[in-house]
Image (cartoon, rainbow, N blue to C red):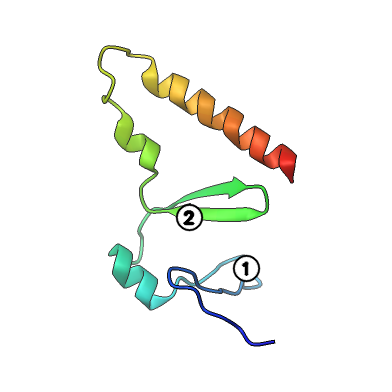
Amino acid sequence: MEQVTIPGQAQVTVSSEGQISIPKDVLDTLHLAGGAQLTLQLRGQEIILSKDPAWMSLEGAASDDPGFVDKFSAMRKDERERENARI
């Protein structure tokens, strides 16, 4: 079976220590260097690595509702639980 490469995706191998190497073109595109902090999320059987979680940039966006970020975080937690239940 021929392996097909989809732009924006890369296949990596997990080392015996549980580590992966991020391909150089991905590092360059995201302007990542050694020591960069990433956020890891599990979505069912998927592992999502994010440079900056999109929801974090929303803090302060709803200044009229000081509990907005907490409410949004709870909503995302519920969504993840529903996604995981489907798998």
| Residue 29 picture quarter | bottom left
- Give the spatial CA distance, label 2 vs label 1: 18 Å
- Callout 1: 10 Å neighbours few (<14), some, many (20+)? few
Q: Residue at x 45, y 25 (%)?
A: 72
User: On the rendered structure, is 57 left or right of 6?
Assistant: left
Quadrant occupied by the N terminus: bottom right
User: On the rendered structure, is 23 left or right of 18?
Assistant: left
Name the mark on residue 17: 1
Q: Earlier in the sequence, mark 2 or mark 1?
A: 1
Residue 17, given in percent of the width and then of the height, sits at 62, 68
The image shows residue 46, relative to residue 13, as above or below, that is: above
Label 2 amino acid?
Answer: Leu
Q: Residue at x 60, y 48 (%)?
A: 42
Q: Nearer the viewer, mark 2 or mark 1?
A: 2
What secondary structure is found at the residue carrying circle 2? strand
Label 1 amino acid?
Answer: Glu
Name the mark on residue 49: 2
